[in-house]
Amino acid sequence: MPEPASSPRALLIGMAGSARLAHALATVGIGLAAGALFLQRTLGWAGFLAAVVVALVLMLLSYLARQDEIAWRSLLPVSLLVFLVWAAVSLVWSDYKWATVGGLAYLLAFTLIALFVAISRDTIQIVRAFGDVLRVALGASLGIEVFSGILIDAPLPFLGVHGALGTLGPISGIEPSRDQLGLVAIIGAISFATEHRTRSVPRLVSVLSLILAGLCIVLTQSPVIAFATIVVGIAAAVIYGVRRVRPERRQAWQFAVLGLAVAASVLLWVFRSPVITLFNASGTLDFRIDLWRRVIDLATLNGLQGWGWVGPWRTEIFPFSVLNTAVRPTDSALNAFLDIWLQLGAVGVVIFLGMVGLAFSRSWLLAGARRSVVYAWPAAALVALIIVSLAESSILSEFGWMTFVICCTKASQELSWRSALRSASNATHLPPERR
């Protein structure tokens, strides 16, 4: 006998399964990742983790109430699943098992948030959610910097704000570092430009949002972000060009673009010294090179399997304690690939490269082939994440990891080899006249 529509259980299911709640939860999930540091320092770790747990519980209820509507077309991308399993297996040989368990739980929490966003929202809805959240995050960052650097002309140590806006930066706002703020601003700029092209928000809102993102990028005074912004701009122009090529000639152009990208990478390596000088990055690079050398020395000791996953470094435990310095404290290797090698070994690096490569190639092909401009958003976002990951490890946690998992999952849903195999298998069972 069907349950009455007015029963408490039916009302609860109706509320949990509403599209409005799914939209709100997606926005909250992105906000928790983008404002993680600010929330940790204002609510404390206990308050922040409680907010994450509550969000995950509500997301689970929303998914259960809408599971008939949500199409897990290709479930979790296999490459992502393999990476998560390898990180979990590292618990076996980790010398800091309690930290590995905590790091795995933290990684899994943001993975689940990203999966909920990816499967419950379509791409334009995801772009809109990112746009709404990042307008607030960038506005709050600039507002705090104005308050600290101009109104009171004093730093705010509990937020990590140095009050340098009076000298035009560098600023970090509500983010852990200027590079992280720059990454958020680049992803924001990509989202705002997509909103503008799809007319998802009023033109004035999108224009002012792009100006806000541009200001934050400039005021970070980060060579890493300056370089990443240029590369993302070039990538966006290439995507625009490829989309205008006739479908029958598109593959040839894609190979030409690949060849040019390889040639440009070689030239950048050959002429790296003048490039570093151009971006005024010598001091920053000297620190990174010294850190990378020490990371490599420790990584080679457990070269195959790594020391065990922890995510952002716990600087009170070995080997991270000997890598952290009082002169310039850091909670990462400032390079995602070296961080993976240190924590998950060469096996982890191979899995990570495969995962990133698959996500990017799928996203790039979709950006060039699909009619809607929204399909360019994951490809452009992945370009930003990959470039910044050469000088930061932000792709491995919180906002960077959540954004990557969303892009990876959406690309897998649209271009899944499992779906292709299922379609081919179904086609072989059709009668000849229906094939």
Image (cartoon, grey):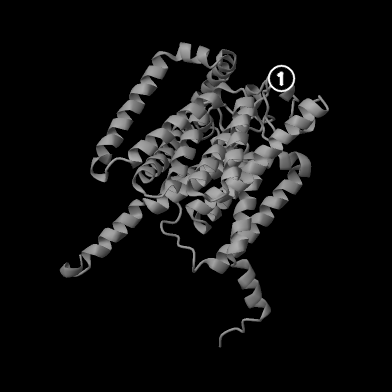
Q: Position of residue 130 (x, y in %)?
A: 58, 46
Q: Position of residue 166 (x, y in %)?
A: 74, 22
Q: Secondary structure at mark 1?
A: helix
Q: State the residue lying farthest toward the left.
A: 432
Q: State the residue lying farthest toward the bottom.
A: 1
For the C terminus, the quadrant is: bottom left
For the N terminus, the quadrant is: bottom right
Compared across the picture, whether 342 is left or right of 234 comes to right
Compared across the picture, whether 8 is left or right of 115 comes to right
Location of residue 249 by image quarter: top left
Residue 246 visible in the snapshot:
yes
Identify which residue is drawn at 55% across, 35% down. Answer: 186
Identify which residue is drawn at 64% across, 28% down. Answer: 178
Residue 108 visible in the snapshot:
no
Identify which residue is drawn at 59% across, 67% down. Answer: 17
Check the image and report above or below for 168 versus 271.
below
How many numbered dots are placed on residues in this image?
Answer: 1
Give whichever of 162, 392 is nearer the camera: 162
Identify which residue is drawn at 30% across, 36% down. Answer: 254
Q: State the residue lying farthest toward the right.
A: 152
Location of residue 285 by image quarter: top right
Q: Which residue is mark 1?
A: 167
Give whichever of 343, 198 is nearer the camera: 198
Identity, as a three-letter code, of the amino acid under mark 1: Thr
Location of residue 38 by image quarter: top right
Check the image and report above or below for 380 versus 293.
below
Check the image and report above or below for 310 versus 429.
above
